[in-house]
Amino acid sequence: LVISVSAFYLLKNRHREIAQASMKLALGLAVFASVLQLVTGHGSAINVAEIQPAKLAAFEGLYETDAPADLYLVGWVDESNERTVGLAVPKGLSWLLYGDADAPVTGLNSFAPEDRPPVNIVFQSYHLMVAIGMFLIGIALVSLLFFLRGKLFETRWLLWVLTFSVLGPQLANQ
C-alpha cells in the first residue's frame, strides 16, 4: 500500500520528498517480504502434501500417483477425462516437495471421488496465486534495480505498475 501511494504521488508530482522516502523504506521491505513469502509458501505446500494430499493433487491437477510427478506452470484440467494438459516441468513437483525428482506424489485417483475437491477451479486459482506472487517478487526486484540506478522515481511506466500493484496481494489472497 505504501509503495502504491508513494508511486501515485510521484506520478502526480505531489509530496515528492515524503513519497521518495516512503518508497525507499517500503521497497526494502517489499523485496524482503516477497522473497520470504516464496520460502513460507514452499513450506506451506510441503505441509499440504503431508496433511491434505488430495488438496495438493488438485492444486497440481495430478490424478495418477506418479513417480515422478510433473509441475504444471500453466494448464487446464479436463475433469471428466481426469487429465491435465499444459506446460509442465518434468519431475518438478516431486523435486520441489521431496528434493527427489523420482519421489512419488499421491494423485487424486488414490481418493474416493466424494473426498476430492473440485479440481479445475482449485488448479486455476492456485496457479493464479503463484503467478501473482512471482510477479510481485519480480516487480519488487526490478524496482530495486531501478532505485539502485537512480531511475525509479522518474520511470513513469514502472510507477504506474507500482501504483496498481497493491491489488496483487488482495487477488492472490482471495
Image: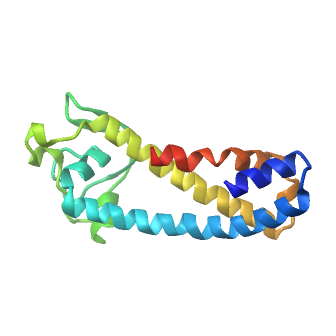
Along the line of sight, which residue is nearer the eye, 70 or 143?
A: 143
Q: Pick out the residue farthest to the top.
A: 80
Is 41 drawn above or below residue 111 in the view shown? below
> Residue 84 lies in what quarter of the image?
top left
Q: Which residue appears at 12% of the width and 42% of the height?
A: 115
User: So how many labels did they put on this image?
Assistant: 0
Is 71 drawn above or below residue 44 in the view shown? above
Q: Is residue 165 left or right of residue 53?
A: right
In the image, residue 130 lies at what x, y percent? 46, 51
In the image, residue 14 lies at what x, y percent? 90, 50
Is 75 drawn above or below residue 32 in the view shown? above
Is 5 drawn above or below residue 99 in the view shown? above
Colouring scheme applied when the structure was drawn: rainbow
User: Split into 4 quadrants, where in the image is the C terminus?
Assistant: top left
> Residue 90 lies in what quarter of the image?
bottom left
In the image, residue 88 lies at what x, y percent? 38, 48
Q: Is residue 59 left or right of residue 103?
A: right
In the image, residue 117 lies at what x, y percent? 22, 40
Q: Is residue 101 left or right of residue 64?
A: right
Q: Which residue appears at 20% of the width and 61% of the height?
A: 51
